[in-house]
């Protein structure tokens, strides 16, 4: 069973930083593209950025220059480092994994989400 467990959310003042973690199990981590998404109240879930199995990253315009996605294969964990946070970054942040799972082939899995609240 593929599982993604997120942590690191919380309340932070504008201009502050947070680092979110996404620990993966049940998936061949070296095959997985890891994505971070966010969903603000009343809005759709939007991509923040992603990192491929080879370590290539891409970001949406709102994340460029402030957010950094990384991965640690030894820990099967992906990270989202968020700096210079703004109130408009307030949302539930979700981790997504797309990769190979033993005996199941190609899978996609979402984490449970973690709340990030940025106060002004």
Image (cartoon, helix red, strand yellow):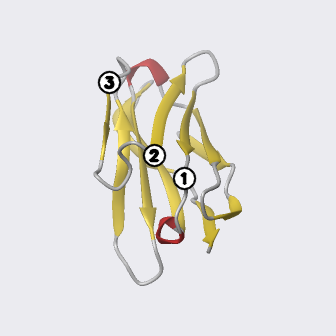
Q: Residues within 10 Å of mark 1 (few under 14, many from 20)?
A: some
Look at the numbered disc 2 and give the secondary structure of its residue: loop
- Residue 55 as seen in the image, left or right of residue 78: left
Give the Cα separation between the discs numbered 1 and 2.
6 Å
Residue shown at 60% from the left, 57% from the top = 15
Image marks 3 and 1: residues in contact by CB distance under 8 Å: no
Give the Cα separation between the discs numbered 2 and 3.
17 Å
Residue shown at 55% from the left, 31% from the top = 26
Q: Earlier in the sequence, mark 3 or mark 1?
A: 3
Image quarter of the C terminus: bottom right
Q: Which residue is mark 3?
A: 56
Q: Which residue is mark 2?
A: 66
Look at the numbered disc 3 and give the secondary structure of its residue: loop
Q: Which residue is mark 1?
A: 84
Image marks 1 and 2: residues in contact by CB distance under 8 Å: yes
Q: Residues within 10 Å of mark 2 (few under 14, many from 20)?
A: some
Residue 43 rendering spot, x and y as whole percentages: 37, 78
């Amino acid at each position: 069973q593929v599982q993604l467990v997120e942590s690191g959310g919380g309340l932070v003042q504008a201009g502050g930083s947070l680092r979110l973690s996404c620990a993966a199990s049940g998936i061949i981590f070296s095959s997985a593209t890891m994505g971070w998404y966010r969903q603000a109240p009343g809005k759709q879930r939007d991509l923040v950025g992603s990192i491929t199995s080879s370590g290539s990253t891409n970001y949406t315009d709102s994340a460029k220059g402030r957010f950094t996605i990384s991965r640690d294969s030894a820990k099967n964990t992906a990270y989202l480092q968020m700096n210079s946070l703004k109130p408009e970054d307030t949302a539930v942040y979700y981790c997504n994994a797309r990769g190979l799972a033993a005996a199941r082939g190609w899978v996609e899995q979402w984490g449970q989400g973690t709340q990030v609240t940025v106060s002004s």
